Amino acid sequence: MAKSYDVVVIGAGPGGMTAALYASRANLSVAMVDRGIYGGQMNNTAAIENYPGFKSIMGPDLAQQMYDSSVNFGAEYVYGSVESVEDKGEVKLVKTDSDELEAKVVIIATGSEYKKLGIPGEHEYGGKGVSYCAVCDGAFFRHKNVVVVGGGDSAIEEASYLAGIVDHVTVIHRRDQLRAQKVLQDRAFENDKIDFVWNSNVTEVLGDGKKVTAVKVVNNQTNETSELETSGVFIYVGLLPMTEPFANLKITNEDGWIKTNDQMETAVPGIYAIGDVRQKELRQITTAVGDGGIAGQQAFKYVEALSSKGQTEAAR
Ligand code: NAP
């Protein structure tokens, strides 16, 4: 039989953990389901400098502190990979790979995953030099040269992090301007261990069968092709929403991000979406936390409204 909760939060990143904190502190029974370690993308982030209260904190440390808060009022962490959510009106059925959970409210906080370049060699050399996580893999490249692909916050922040470990970092960006926040750009430009290859696309990861040895680079202005020797390729070319299990609910936009209003309500009553998985402008820990607080509070109101409706119907 499915275990019943007031609220099931899907995803234990900063948004999900905050929603679990707010809902459980309001005395609701809460399960927070995640298929991995709590913390989400924070676990892949070295120093976090834009979360108030901490001048700088390691991502995994902030994840641990948020987790401790999130379960402090009785929310349960449930390990599992959510495969589907069925809307049965006042009850939602959440199916994981090993369990079934019933809830009055579902809060989707599944976030996003790193986009792949989709070039030859990328998959083949995954774990053999190709990485999407500088914090996890940077130490393997001590005293070596690496390449970072992309020009957004992730690419530039992680390039600076890698420069503290490796001998040299080359950032390869498809335009002649970075998208990253100015503070991150300035830091990278000032770092003499980082240089930039502009207007260029990485078209192939090359290797000796066991490990990465170089990347093939094409200048998109001149069409000139070159090979750049490197031991590592860190790819940060954007994010894809993790919304596949919710396709049946028809709550996403054409790019797969979930549409909500300011109260984090989706088009389905009782189903909310928060954090990076939402259609939104600014994807940050702070904004995910804000979304989580709102959804946790809305969940309380929704459950209260359901129970007073039930009481009125019973009294008739
Ligand atoms: P992003 O902002 O979408 O940037 C992706 C970068 O990859 C862009 O520079 C883009 O180039 C480039 N790119 C995209 N597709 C490409 C392709 N096929 N080939 C080559 N280059 C490609 O992604 P992100 O940097 O991962 O950041 C995601 C979100 O997280 C953002 O909202 C960001 O602000 C946030 N974030 C914040 C922080 C922080 O506040 N410290 C840290 C990390 C991430 P163009 O510029 O030409 O489009």
Image (cartoon, grey):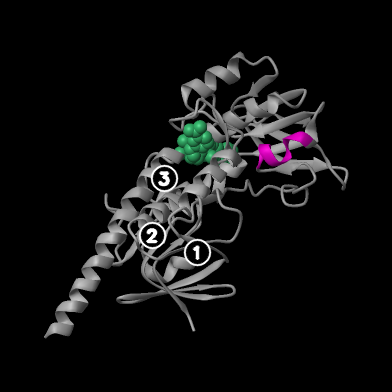
| Amino acid type assigned to the residue bearing label 1 in the image | Glu
* Disc 2: which residue: 252
Find the magenta span and give its range.
Answer: 133-139
* Residue linked to disc 3: 288
Up-down relation of residue 186 to residue 84 (above or below): above
Q: Quadrant of the C terminus?
A: bottom left
Looking at the rendered structure, the kind of residue marked 3 is: Ala
Kindly identify the amino acid type of the residue bearing the numbered disc 2. Answer: Thr
| Mark 2 surroundings within 10 Å by alpha-carbon count, few (fewer than 14), some (14 through 19), many (20 or more) | many
Residue at image position (59%, 20%) is 188
Magenta span: predominant SS is: helix
- Asked which quadrant contains residue 164, the reply is top right
Q: Are marks 3 and 1 in contact (CB under 8 Å)?
A: no
- CB atoms at circles 3 and 2 under 8 Å apart? no
In terms of depth relative to the viewer, which is nearer, 268 or 293? Answer: 293
Label 2 sits on a secondary structure element that is loop
The residue located at (69%, 24%) in the rendering is: 163
